[in-house]
Image (cartoon, grey):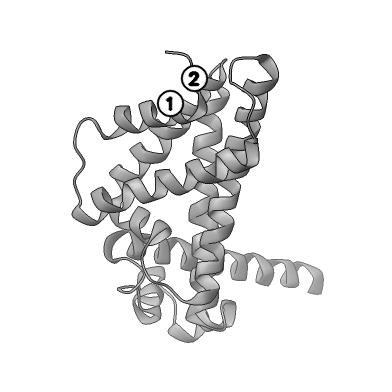
Amino acid sequence: MAYRTTERVKARLSASRERTIAAALEIMAEHGYAGCAVAAVAERAGIATGSVYRHFPTKADLFAEVFRTASQREIDAVARAAARERTAAARLAAVVATFAGRALQAPRLAYALLAEPVNPAVDAQRLVFRRAHADLIAGYVAEGVASGELPPQDPELTATALVGALAEAMVGPLAAGVAGPDTIPGLTRFIHRALGVSP
């Protein structure tokens, strides 16, 4: 009987933790990192503020986990889109379309993930997010070089530069809340030229 109670308690705590993360993500998508107070997260999650701190000792701990969760969703979406394509050029076009398209659909959240000033612990997660994107792109570049579709190049260096360029190119449109109709096609053309994709 005691074992079942322990499992029930664990399940309840896990559910409370997940509700807290979901609530923080929603608020961050609406108001950004700066506009996301722990008390507001607790209220939206339907728990006491003290319960938030039971799961996450500081606001930085909470938002580092929120960044990890949101970032993983973005990485997974990009990887799924690219996996449906057969060539390096098409995979990288899918990366751009998915990365930029999702950012423009949720500009406040994307701005928080990419550029909003944050606590150093949270900023460390931003670097992990960029590294994960770079690792994904490096794999596609390496495959393209190996197949002869792309000219010889350092996949890691190329991928890191492309992630930086994509993120920087999105900051202005995200901050303004608008993007021109040529944003994604223009970024795709830029990426293809940078990679040496044949016209």
- In the rendered image, residue 4, in percent from the top left (x then y), is placed at 76, 67
Q: Which residue is mark 2?
A: 197
Q: Quadrant of the C terminus?
A: top left
For marks 1 and 2, give the CA distance. 6 Å
Residue ID at (47%, 14%): 198
Asked whether, in this view, residue 50 is left or right of residue 36, the answer is: right
In the rendered structure, which amino acid carries the disc numbered 2? Answer: Val
Asked whether, in this view, residue 23 is left or right of residue 51, the answer is: left
**Image height of 90 relative to 105, above or below:** above
Instruction: Give the SS element for disc 1.
Output: helix
Residue ID at (55%, 60%): 127
Q: Nearer the viewer, residue 1 or 104?
A: 104
- In the rendered image, residue 5, in percent from the top left (x then y), is placed at 72, 72
Number of numbered tags placed on the structure image: 2
Q: Nearer the viewer, residue 53 or 198?
A: 198
- In the rendered image, residue 9, in percent from the top left (x then y), is placed at 66, 72
Marks 1 & 2, CB-CB < 8 Å contact: yes
Residue 80: image quadrant is top right
Q: Which residue is mark 1?
A: 193
